[in-house]
Image (cartoon, helix red, strand yellow):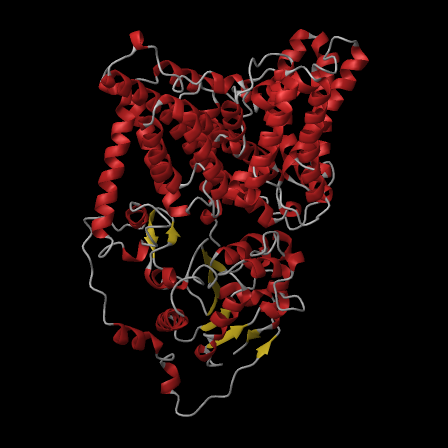
Amino acid sequence: MKIKSYLLIILIVVSVAGISVCSYLNIPSRYQEYFVSVKSEPVMAPLLKGATAGVYPWTEVVEEPVPEEQAQKPAEPPARVEEEPEPAKPKTFTLVDDSYFDDAVFIGDSRMVGLSQYCPALDERATFFAKKSLTIYNIQKDAWVEVENGPKETVFDALSKISFSKVYIMVGINEIGTGTNERYHDAYADVINRILEIQPNALIYINSTMHVTKEKSDGDPIYNNGNINVRNAALFDLIDWQHVFFLNINDMLDDEEGNLNASLSGDGVHLKGSCYEPWHQYLLYNAIVE
Amino acid sequence: MEYTILIELGRNTMTFSDLNFIVRALPLFLILYYIFPAKVRPWLLLVASLAFYCANDWKFVALLIGATAINYGFAKLVYKKKKWALVLSIIFNAGLLTGFKVAGRLDLGVAFPLGLSFYIFKMISYQVDLYKELIKEVSFRNMSVYFTMFPQILSGPISRYSFVETNDSWTALPVEEHPSKWQRVQDVLAKIEDGLKYFVIGLFMKVMIADHLVVLWSDIKTIGYESISTPLAWLGAYAYSMNLYFDFWGYSLMAAGLGVMLGFPFIENFIQPYAARSVSDFYRRWHATLGSWFRDYIYFPLGGSKKGKWRTVFNLTVVWLVTGLWHGMTVNFLLWAMVLLVIILVEKFVLSKWEKVFKIVGRINVLVLIPCTWVIFAIHSVRRLGTYGLRLFPVMNNGIAVNQNDILYLLPSYWPYLLMGLIFAIPFVQTFYRKHKDNVFITLIIFVMFWISIISLANSAGNPFMYLRF
């Protein structure tokens, strides 16, 4: 009998053994954050997860920066507050029409994608930089904005090429199971500061992370409204009522118990295509006119 | 719904597409299985099967053991040609299945035991075949392995008893034919290699095609059926059809591959159904072991098609009513079964009179009507089904906030999986594989498919909805 009669067994056994050993040796260094436990998954799993995220066994291990320094820098409140000699009068919301969004940019995750696809009044006027699975950390670090005939670029590069005066942001659901509230807050503050560096007079509207339905919230240890509320509250100190505002869109979309109204959602997380209008209306009624 | 039980199970249990099963439990069991002598292997398989059942649904393992013991008692009597025992055994088994199905429908708070629909059908088949003397002896060992074997307990295939009798690794060869130790090792390795190839192909179909296309179907649910364009409604119908096909065909191939690794013959559950010439032909090829069960234990005993036209209509109606209820006790499953019954009756009594027309219309039925019937299968609420139906066939406008470009937003993410599904659905691909399965190049392709599936599994932890980010 020739070796080719059991070639697949040989290939699989050798490769699984090799990858397992390699993964085991690298768990303390490269794959620590991908490691769950030997009991719950095979030893090779951390390497496979790490490699998918671009961390290969030959990738150099980068020393973690000193956490204190990093935590403090972006945590500073938006710089312009310090520049004001005395506190300015808080700006108040007013009703506008759709032309208000002609120079608006919307940045966000799949829920923002949904707004662009199912709210033509906004899609026809505003610019959308939205992507499924987007997090505040992606906005902060990654080049993810699609550009015609060119490589993807960061949202800051994309913003510096267009004219805008209002920025609406909604993220928060994808990163809810990762990082701390402080890290989330700091990343958000960093993103706001960098947008204001590009356009110092821009109005930035933080849209609250939208709730999930009661059924989803009750059955999910991570994506539930308790966690969402904590993350929303973590952003309150970024509001300065001059340039940075908070839009609690959940006011418009919740049921009486504070969960996303189940009749508005097909999957418990996203609005149905026909249910984006309340959000749109909320934006119209809660705008700042200089 | 039987076909999607594996998706639900995948979250925190051990199915075939679980990394712990593939790289830990399975190799360990195979080593033990082949280290021990031939006569011990069935017992090892029995113990492993019960352990596997416990890992997935320990609450109902006592029911499986109890039903096996009671069927053994019945078998002793049925073997002595006691017809009342046969009737009682059928009433007991069918009653057990119906009881749990009805309890589930009435929301009595009783969970549905894992694999019950499948092992009960095996038990009925066993008793009937024993009475008909197709089974020559009552062997507790073989019978209990037949009912409980882990490659088939979750979701079939519904093999016949002869399947366990033909296991060639359970019988030690006579001394004069005794091959050398090395020869025996080679035989075992060849068996495992053969089964492993089926297993990997099945794994790839499940993990890389079905588990990705189910997310497309979920995206459509997210948008809301009232807001999808007609092209997206059709894409959804085909995506769901492919998801179901590759989820279940993939699972069946994994189950068959495991069987081959253990010395059983290959069991074919999907025989290129989308190459069928008619809907009747489709259901001879789709989940073939279930179709042949209904044929042999319901349709033929009722008289099949040999007792006149109206009796045939009645018999087919009974078969499809039971098929619908077996799949689920909601209105949509009955509707699904009745629509199929009507198509099959029209094919059998009307279209068959015009051979040339039938050749074309039969294919259209398979390639266009079958995906529509899967939509009925998928959507449990009749009202929502009506909404989806009107998006498929927009005879009146029921759309709300429809984005006519929606299909263009979804296609870029899913076209690779749809394309892979189309390729695997071509009969030539299977024929080509069978002809060249020992070719080194084909083996290397399967090896790559193995690693693609494993990497995907490592990142999704066996839960297809892990791909569903917000």
Tell which of B444 and A147 is nearer to you: B444
Above/below status of B181 relative to B69? above
Examine the rendering and report whether any part of residue B235 can be seen: no
Residue A136 location, x and y as percent? 40, 64
Q: Which residue, as the protein is rendered here, is positioned at the far bottom?
A: A86
Above/below status of B200 relative to A277? above
The answer to whether residue B294 is left or right of residue B48 is right
Q: Quadrant of residue A144?
A: bottom left
Residue B256 location, x and y as percent? 45, 25
The answer to whether residue B188 is left or right of residue B249 is left
Q: Give the residue drawn at x 65%, y 8%.
A: B356
The answer to whether residue B229 is left or right of residue B16 is right
Q: Give the residue drawn at x 39%, y 42%.
A: B457
Q: Quadrant of residue B438?
A: top left
Q: Give the residue drawn at x 67%, y 30%.
A: B93
Q: Quadrant of residue B328?
A: top right
Tell which of A13 and B108 is nearer to you: B108
Above/below status of B361 relative to A83? above
How many dots with numbers?
0
Residue B294 location, x and y as percent? 65, 21
For the N terminus of chain B, the image quarter is top right
Q: Give the residue drawn at x 33%, y 35%.
A: B28
Tell which of B263 and A64 is nearer to you: B263
The answer to whether residue A187 is left or right of residue B407 is left
Residue B374 location, x and y as percent? 62, 32
Examine the rendering and report whether any part of residue A106 can be seen: yes
